[in-house]
Image (tube, rainbow, N blue to C red):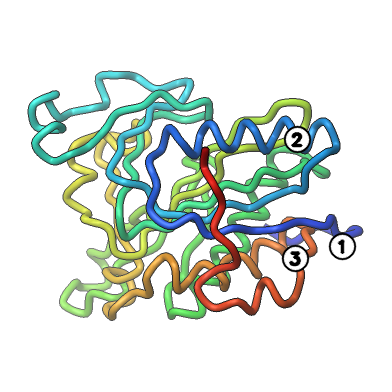
Amino acid sequence: MPAPPAAALAPAVWRWLGRVPFAETAALQERLRRDVIAGVGPETVLLLEHAPVITLGRAADGANVLATEEELARRGVAVHRASRGGDVTYHGPGQLVGYPVVRLRRGVRAHVEGMARALIEVLAAWGVEARYRSDAPGLWTKDEGQPEIEPAARTERKICAFGINVHHRVSVHGFALNLDPALDAFRLIVPCGMAGAAVTSLREASGRAAPSPEALAPVVAEALGRHLGLAFDADQIATEGGAVTMDLA
C-alpha cells in the first residue's frame, strides 16, 4: 500500500471531544459536512471516545447483533443505525474513534488507505505490526504480544475498523482503533459481519499498557494530517491532550 504522490495540503482543524454519545456526533458530522460543502467551514477531524454503542452500517444484517435487548440494557449499550458503509460494530471506552470530515481528493479507496497508513505508523511506534486488508476493511495484526502462544498458532485479529459515508465528495465517519476497550463487548455482535473473526487491542497485541484515547489523539491527528493531506496548525498538534473541545449542540 504505497503512499500516493504528495499534493497541496488543505487547511484543517482537529478536535478532541472526549467521551460522547454516538447520535450527537453523527449529527455534528453532518453539520460540519454541510459547512464544508458550502465553503463556510473548515475540514475537521473529530477524535473521541463513544459511550458504549452498537452501530449498524447501511449493509448491516440485524441478526449480527447477538445480544438480547435485555442484555444490552443491562450493560448500558445503545444501538443506532449509521450512514457509514459496512455491517455491525461496537464502540466504547478505551477505543479511539476518528471522524475526518474532509474533501476526497483522490477517491474513496485512497481516503481509507490514507487513514490506514497513518494508523499503521502509530501502531508501529508501539511495537505492533498491522496490515490493511481491503477484503475486510480494517487493520489486522497477530498475537505477537502474547509470548505464551506458539508462533504457528498465532492468528490474525482485527485491531481497527473502517467505515465511511461520502456525499458531494465530502466524507464522514472514519475509523475505530482499539486501545484498551472491554474486548468481551465484541461478543455481543458478529464483528463487521465476519463470523469467527477475532478482535484485539493495542494492550493485548503489544503486551503492555496502552495510552488513553485522549493521550494518543495528538499523535493520531499528526499522522492523519500527513496521510490525508491536511495542514493543521503546528501549535494545535502540539497541544497536549488534543486541541479544543467542541460544542455538540
Mark 3 or 1, nearer chain start: 1
User: Residue at the spot x=75%, y=76% of the render?
Assistant: 234
Task: Find residue 16 and report its horizontal and vertical position in percent.
Answer: 53, 60
Q: Position of residue 18 (x, y in %)?
A: 43, 57
Question: Regarding mark 1 in the picture, which secondary structure is present there?
Answer: loop
Q: What's the mark number on residue 231? A: none
Q: Is residue 138 left or right of residue 186?
A: right
For the point 29% across and 19% down, the residue is 62
User: How many C-alpha atoms fall within 10 Å of the one at disc 3: few (<14), some, or many (≥20)?
Assistant: many
Report how far apart the C-alphas of labels 3 and 2 lie in the structure.
18 Å
Q: Which residue is mark 3?
A: 232
Q: Is 72 left or right of 55, judged from the image as shown?
A: left
**Amino acid at dot 1:** Ala
Q: Which residue is mark 2?
A: 35
Q: Nearer the viewer, residue 128 or 244?
A: 244
* Res 117 quadrant in image: bottom right
Q: Residue 143, percent across and down?
A: 29, 68
What residue type is disc 3 on? Answer: Phe
- CA gap between label 3 and label 1 equals 16 Å
Say which element carries label 2: helix
* Residue under the image location 22 percent in, 54 percent down: 183
Q: Is residue 68 left or right of residue 1?
A: left
